Amino acid sequence: MIATQWGEPSEMQYAEVADPTPGPGQVLIDVKAIGCNFPDILIVQGKYQMKPPLPFSPGHEVAGIVLAVGAGVTRVHQGQRVFAMIELGAYAERAVADETRVFAIPDAMSFEEAAAFALVNQTSYSALVHRAQMQPGEWLLVHAAAGGVGLAAVQIGKALGARVIATAGTAAKLEIARQSGADVLVDYRTEDWVERVKRVTDGHGADVIYDPVGGDVFDGSSKCIAFEGRLLVVGFAGGRIPSIAANRILLKNMSVVGVHWGMYQTLGSPLVDQWMSALLTMHGKGQIWPVIYKTYPLADAAKALAAIAARESYGKVVLIP
């Protein structure tokens, strides 16, 4: 799929292009599954923090089989099942990834699961463990808990011993969050979730708040956060980028903590490999697992992204070339 102009995903073109060639330190992957993420929509619209030169193929997650490796590659070999987190170009039958961004797929994981695994879990693990330093027994409030990063946060939080409060907008989505380990379910459309969080925690508030929404959700979160709580700024799916009065930060000794996971990968941080090792261990123990809403043919990428944009989907949406 190729974006030739800034616009809606429906304007992308399903076209033939030349196969990429791996350079030194790179891996060519025969793509079997592609993970879709909300930022894919923003990149195509030209509304993301990065604007790639046109034309381009969107997407950051692929799973498949190594077709060829460039000079100096030792991490993987031809014929190996792998998944990768790439800069761009995932919506394709062939993709090139830097060796450092490629990981072996465990035997028990399918291509579809592998394509849905990396980004949401890396984001949520780095947020909860590295940025929030969450402790067992703490209250974790996860907003948009049935979304990709939200479900990952619920599962990882539960695995780390947190008491998890999940918010979502339908009974069906709350059920998905419950199946992933949420202890308390809150329908934000019908309940005053700020007051519910206060009641559930006996007035203590949420120690860690995972917010991929922003806007009014961020504002409300600052009202039900615990003393010395950590409010994780993960994204702005709600559209409005919020702000906060500094006196509110002071009064509760709260921390407003940014979660820009992509910078760790861009900077070549060794933490990414450490986090992936921890996540694959969790997966092997059955503590975390990809939740896939639906798979679509690659040619129907616009429909897949429309399902995400309309908040119809839960977990991850996957494309199949």
Image (cartoon, rainbow, N blue to C red):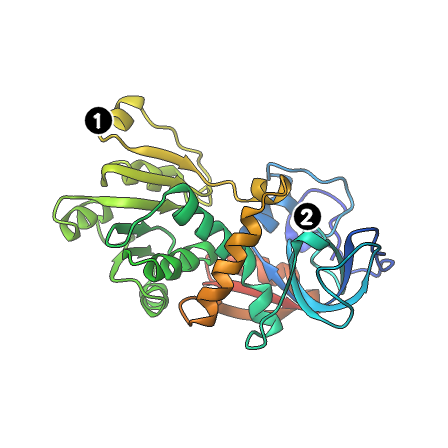
Q: Position of residue 14 (x, y in %)?
A: 76, 60
Q: In the rendered view, would you say 282 is above or below 200?
A: below
Residue 111 x, y percent position in the rendering: 62, 72
The part of the image, by quadrant, that contains residue 68 is: bottom right
Image location of residue 253, percent across then percent down? 25, 30
N-terminal of the pair, mark 1 or mark 2, is 2
Please identify the quarter of the rendering in which residue 174 is found. bottom left
Q: Nearer the viewer, residue 127 or 212?
A: 127
Determine which residue is flagged by label 1. 251
- Numbered label attached to residue 297: none
What's the residue at 83%, 51% (across, down)? 24
* Label 1, label 2: how far apart the Cα atoms are: 40 Å
Q: Which residue is mark 2?
A: 87
Amino acid type, mark 1: Leu
Image quadrant occupied by the N terminus: bottom right
**From the image, which quarter does the C terminus lie in?**
bottom right
Vertically, is 109 above or below 136? Answer: below
Residue 31 point in image, percent of width and height: 72, 67
Q: Amino acid at mark 2?
A: Glu
